[in-house]
């Protein structure tokens, strides 16, 4: 089996989503009836040194991506749009819409949003502090965006609740693959007739996030929560519908500048495919790979921020441990562990991280890594990502 190399960083960009306040151009006033429109963006450069047991290192600085953000904010309405253009071999050989949604504020805490938006699963859109992201990102469980409607409300007991329906995934855009030119990892129609041909639809999600006030102090904040995801999995070969039953629980602990996030859960997917009942073909970032239908997943994230070390320079070391323990006999478990440091100075962020993957399609593995597995060896990747927000 040929190695499935992802040519650049896989794109978890909290530094881009949480833009510094000085980034972007704002027209209008968000507190006025007309509201304010903010246009911002980012460009990224990447250096990678791959240790995959064979010659695979880029070992040069490369342009990685250009990102356009448009946001609207008023007393009653809000909305966001983001489009990304990546360079693998040539400029914009892969590009994709990431999000496009509008929302209405029912009151200061409650709102309804409609459009292509983050799904309501796990502790939030991002489960960890790294740039490359844990293995659950490649599975399509974190930093995933689909097309639907979400109702968010909060109770006096410091309970946050989200109820959502997503009709379908975010779609396929510009790339070389048949159906995998997309930001979010979704089940896809494979270019290989021997693989699965699936579409996920009618996704129902619920999430409850509870602050534990009895454990909290001025310095300590603790919360726990859980989420559930049910959907129909349309098998285009057999014209039958399987389903997904997936759940997650999570715990956030913040003590001063120390943050710990624990996430774990179970994936159960039935695809109604007699030829491949234990795995489903998934696509993201213009690449296809198989993912085991059943197993337990986890992410442990720890970070500490040293604020204003020298002027506006913030330094955040972090460690991420993530894995997917598969239920199917003979399938090898997958892991991706990351240690790194994020350097934030005004509009510039630099991620310096070391990624270690086993049975990982995006760290020296194959298209079978997240299903049956590959050679089971640890592959290593030095990933440097420079982000300039404007």
Image (cartoon, grey):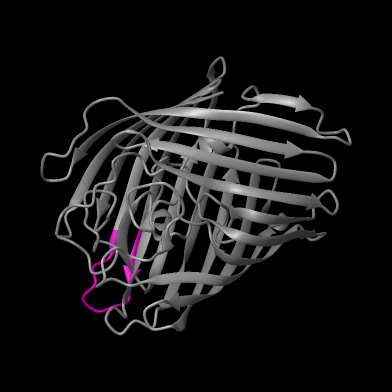
Question: Which residue: 57% across, 56% down?
Answer: 123
Of residue 99 and residue 301, the one placed in the foreground of this image is: 99
Of residue 218 and residue 231, the one placed in the foreground of this image is: 231
Question: Which residue: 66% across, 50% down?
Answer: 101
Is 330 above or below relative to 85? below
Is 346 above or below relative to 274? above
Q: Quadrant of the N terminus?
A: bottom left
Dividing the picture into quadrants, the one containing residue 231 is bottom right
Residue 337 location (% of width, % of height)? 33, 49
Whether residue 292 sits left or right of residue 163 in the image: it is: left
Residue 305 location (% of width, % of height)? 52, 32
Of residue 351 and residue 320, the one placed in the foreground of this image is: 351
The magenta segment: 323-334
Is 325 above or below relative to 272? above
Residue 168 location (% of width, % of height)? 55, 65
Of residue 117 and residue 143, the one placed in the foreground of this image is: 117
Dividing the picture into quadrants, the one containing residue 272 is bottom left
Q: Residue furthest left?
A: 54
Residue 105 location (% of width, % of height)? 81, 50
Whether residue 244 sits left or right of residue 167 in the image: it is: left
The answer to whether residue 160 of the structure is visible from this angle is no
Question: Which residue: 68% across, 37% down?
Answer: 71
Labels in figure, total: 0
Q: Quadrant of the C terminus?
A: top right
Q: Residue furthest right?
A: 33
The answer to whether residue 63 of the structure is visible from this angle is yes
């Amino acid at each position: 089996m040929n190695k499935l190399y992802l040519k650049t960083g896989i794109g978890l960009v909290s530094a881009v989503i949480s833009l510094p306040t000085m980034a972007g151009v704002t027209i209008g006033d968000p507190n006025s009836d007309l509201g304010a429109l903010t246009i911002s963006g980012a460009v990224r450069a990447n250096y990678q040194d791959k240790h995959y047991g064979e010659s695979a290192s880029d070992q040069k600085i490369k342009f990685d991506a250009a990102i356009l953000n448009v946001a609207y904010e008023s007393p009653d309405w809000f909305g966001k749009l983001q489009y990304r253009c990546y360079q693998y071999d040539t400029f914009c050989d892969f590009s994709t819409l990431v999000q496009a949604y509008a929302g209405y504020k029912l009151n200061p805490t409650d709102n309804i949003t409609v459009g292509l938006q983050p799904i309501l699963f796990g502790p939030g859109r991002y489960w960890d502090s790294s740039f490359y992201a844990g293995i659950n990102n490649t599975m399509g469980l974190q930093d995933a965006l689909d097309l639907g409607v979400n109702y968010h409300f909060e109770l006096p007991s410091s309970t946050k609740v989200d109820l959502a329906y997503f009709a379908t995934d975010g779609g396929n855009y510009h790339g070389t693959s048949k159906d995998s030119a997309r930001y979010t990892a979704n089940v896809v129609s494979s270019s290989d007739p021997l693989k699965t041909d699936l579409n996920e639809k009618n996704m129902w999600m619920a999430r409850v996030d509870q602050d534990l006030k009895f454990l909290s102090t001025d310095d300590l904040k603790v919360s726990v929560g859980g989420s559930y995801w049910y959907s129909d999995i349309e098998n285009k070969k057999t014209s039958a519908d399987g389903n997904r039953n997936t759940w997650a629980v999570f715990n956030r602990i913040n003590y001063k500048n120390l943050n710990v996030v624990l996430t774990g859960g179970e994936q159960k997917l039935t695809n109604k495919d007699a030829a491949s009942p234990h795995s489903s073909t998934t696509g993201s970032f213009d690449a296809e790979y198989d993912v085991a239908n059943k197993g337990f997943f986890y992410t442990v994230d720890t970070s500490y921020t040293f604020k204003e070390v020298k002027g506006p320079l913030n330094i955040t070391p972090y460690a991420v441990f993530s894995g997917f323990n598969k239920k199917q006999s003979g399938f090898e478990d997958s892991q991706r562990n990351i240690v790194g440091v994020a350097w934030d100075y005004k509009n510039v962020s630099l991620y310096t991280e070391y990624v270690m993957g086993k049975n990982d399609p995006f760290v020296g593995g194959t298209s079978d890594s997240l299903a049956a597995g590959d050679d089971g060896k640890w592959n290593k990747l030095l990933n440097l990502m420079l982000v300039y927000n404007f």
